[in-house]
Amino acid sequence: MSRVIFHLDMDAFYASVEQRDNPALRGKAVIVGSPPTQRGVVCAASYEARKFGVRSAMPSVTAGRLCPKGVFVRPRMTAYRDESREIMRIVAESNAIVEQMSVDEAYIDFSDVIRAQVQSEDSDELLYAAVPVARDLKERIAFERGLSASIGIAPNKLLAKIASDFKKPNGLTLITERDKVEFLRPMPIRAIHGVGKVTEQELNRVGIQSVGDLQDYPGDLRAIVGSFGPRLKQFAFGDDDRALELGDDVKSISSEETFLHDTADRKLLRKCLQEQADEISAKLRRRQLGAHTVQVKVRYSDFTTLTRQISTEEPLVESADLYRLGCFLLAREKLVRRPLRLLGLGVSSLREPSWRQLPLL
């Protein structure tokens, strides 16, 4: 049965909320996070700041060097969550099926709504009929909330996500069943769901640079990317049968170590944290997920247990990012002020990573 799937993605959400609430910030390179004069990291960046290479999880001092005129703003997570609830309320009023991925992103299945309007089962006819519905949703969010959103319309989740990324910010892109193969051909392979940095390197090694190269590859992709090969081939042709998930199977991923003897040895703790970051990153890759929130957990000899966390706008996958944020939280909160019995690292607010994330510097 034909489907009509929207992917709604708010544009530079944290920074856009700050620019809306403070008109003096509009048009400026806004960096949400600690100032560069303090130990800290970037939680989000406006499009003006992204042009300089600023990205989530980057040390604030690095962001300050890359973007000397950037305006640093402390994150207001409560404000972003409240704003997210208002946006999702607007989405829910459409009577469509919604899978919320994060505070600023959702898949919306409009199949039944559009089918009732046009009385048709032709896939492309249904998709074209959905364009005014998407435009109305964008305009309503802009009018009621003062924020811009990008929406992708497609017959499945894979293509809807690619479409919403295609013309950011304030984009509206339709990928039809008829045009999907040609639309995908010039795309970089990172556009495909599940292709991360490691998979990209393996594919590049055999000369696969674009989705078109994947479509034309005559060999068995399992020899390059293992069991993901057949699925990757399907994705390259725009085929995706994944349904919307109305319940999260995996809400968080964590790793902990209880030490044989309580320790405050920085070298040992850093090694432990790095191993935990590597383990979590590998699990995120296997599940084809990224994390918005990183948390550290410590337990002292008297069994007092503390947790501290930080959230970023872009989903994180790389071990280096997870390790950096873990170290930052330990230092900022002065959690190693006495020997630790246990050290743990965890991630939550999981969603698909974006192919538009900038590479590590």
Image: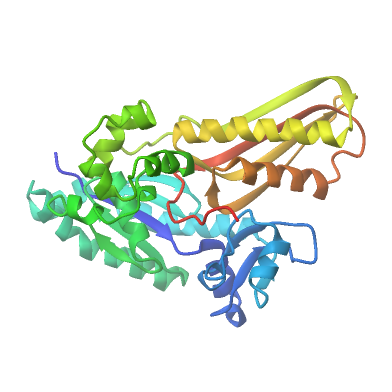
Q: Residue at x 28, y 48 (%)?
A: 211
Q: Residue at x 41, y 68 (%)?
A: 169
In this rendering, position of residue 189 left or right of residue 345: left
Q: Residue at x 44, y 45 (%)?
A: 101
Residue 67 image offset from top left, x and y in percent: 64, 72
Q: What residue occupies the far bottom of the structure in this picture? A: 24
Residue 165 image offset from top left, x and y in percent: 37, 58
Q: Tell which of 115 and 357 is nearer to you.
A: 357
Q: Residue at x 68, y 30 (%)?
A: 275
Q: Is residue 305 visible?
A: no
- Tell me the quadrant of the picture where the N terminus can be found: top left
| Snapshot quadrant of residue 23 | bottom right
Q: What residue occupies the far top of the structure in this picture? A: 260
In this rendering, position of residue 187 left or right of residue 333: left
Where 343 sits versus 83, above or below?
above
Q: How many marks?
A: 0
| Snapshot quadrant of residue 31 | bottom right
Residue 142 image offset from top left, x and y in percent: 41, 71
In this rendering, position of residue 269 left or right of residue 207: right
Q: Is residue 304 visible?
A: yes
- Tell me the quadrant of the picture where the C terminus can be found: bottom right
Q: What residue occupies the far right of the structure in this picture? A: 338
Coloring scheme used? rainbow
Q: Tell which of 322 and 210 is nearer to you.
A: 210
Where 19 sits versus 300, above or below?
below
Residue 289 image offset from top left, x and y in percent: 47, 39
